[in-house]
Amino acid sequence: MSGSETFLGGAVTVALGLLCLSFLVTVYRVVRGPTLPDRIVALDMLVAVALGFIAVIGIRTGITLYIDVAIALGLVGFLATVAFARFVLSRGSYREKNAAEGETAPSNPEVKL
Amino acid sequence: MTHVITNYLTGILIVIGAAFALVASVGLLRLPEFYTRMHAASKAGTLGACVMLIAVAVYTDDTAVASRALAGVIFFLLTAPISAHLLAKAAYAAGYPLWEGSVHDEMPPRAAHKDE
C-alpha cells in the first residue's frame, strides 16, 4: 500500500461523504420545494449527484461498466427534465390558479386543474 | 511512477467534483426562488458531475473506458443547458413569479405567450 493509494482511498471516502451530504440537502428541496419547477430542478440535481456517486464507486471498485450506467442515467435525466418542462408548460398558468385559490369562494371552479 | 501521479490527480479531481456538487445543493437549499435555484443547480451541479467523470477517465488504464467517460462528459455538457433553458422558459411562460428582490426582467410582456 503506497502513499498515493492511501491518498486515493481517503479522497474516495471524503468524496462519498460530501456527495451524501449534498444528496440529503437536495432531497430536502425535493420534499419541501414550494412549487413544481423547484422539485424538477432538484430531481435534475439528484441525477447529477447520482452520476458523481457512480463515478466514485467506479473508481473505488474498478468496475468500469459503471460508466455505461452513468451515460444511460444522464440520458434518462435529460429526457425526464424535458418531459417535465413540457408538463409545466401544458399545465397552464400558475397566476390564474393562484388567484382562483386565493379567493375564499371560487366563483369559477373550472379554472382549477 | 505514472500510477502515483494518476492516483493523486484522481483523488484531487473527485474531491473537487464532490465539493462542487455540495456547493450546488447548498445553493439549491439557500437561494430564494426557482430561477436562482436553477442557476445554482444547472451550472455547479453539471460541473461537479463532469469533473468526477473526468476523474474516472484519468484513473483508468483502458482507452475505451476513458473515451466513454469523456463522451459522457460531452453529452452531459450538451444536454444540461438545453434542459435548464427549456425548464426556465416553461416556468416563465406558465407565470411563476420572480423573486421580489429581482431588479430586472428581460422578458416583460409576460402574458403575451403564444401557447396560452
Image: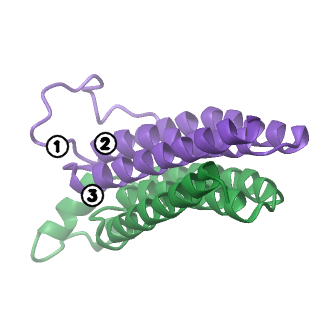
Chain colours: A green, B purple
Residue ID at (25%, 69%): A108
Q: Mark 1 falls within which chain? A: B
Residue B65: give x, y in percent of width and height. Answer: 84, 45
Crowd rating for badge 3 (residues with CA inside 10 Å; few <14, some 14–19, many 20+): many
The total of numbered circles placed on residues is: 3
* Mark before the other along the chain sequence, 3 or 2: 3
Q: Is residue A17 visible?
A: yes
* Mark before the other along the chain sequence, 3 or 1: 3
In space, the residues marked 1 and 2 are separated at their CA atoms by 8 Å
Crowd rating for badge 1 (residues with CA inside 10 Å; few <14, some 14–19, many 20+): few
Classify residue B82 by image quadrant: top right
Which residue does the numbered mark 3 point to in the structure image? Answer: B29
Of residues A58 and B36, the one nearer the viewer is: A58
Residue ID at (59%, 42%): B8
Residue A62: give x, y in percent of width and height. Answer: 78, 60
Which residue does the numbered mark 1 point to in the structure image? Answer: B99
Residue B95: give x, y in percent of width and height. Answer: 30, 46
Look at label 2 and name its amino acid.
Tyr
Q: Marks 1 and 2: CB-CB under 8 Å?
A: yes
Classify residue B109 by image quadrant: top left
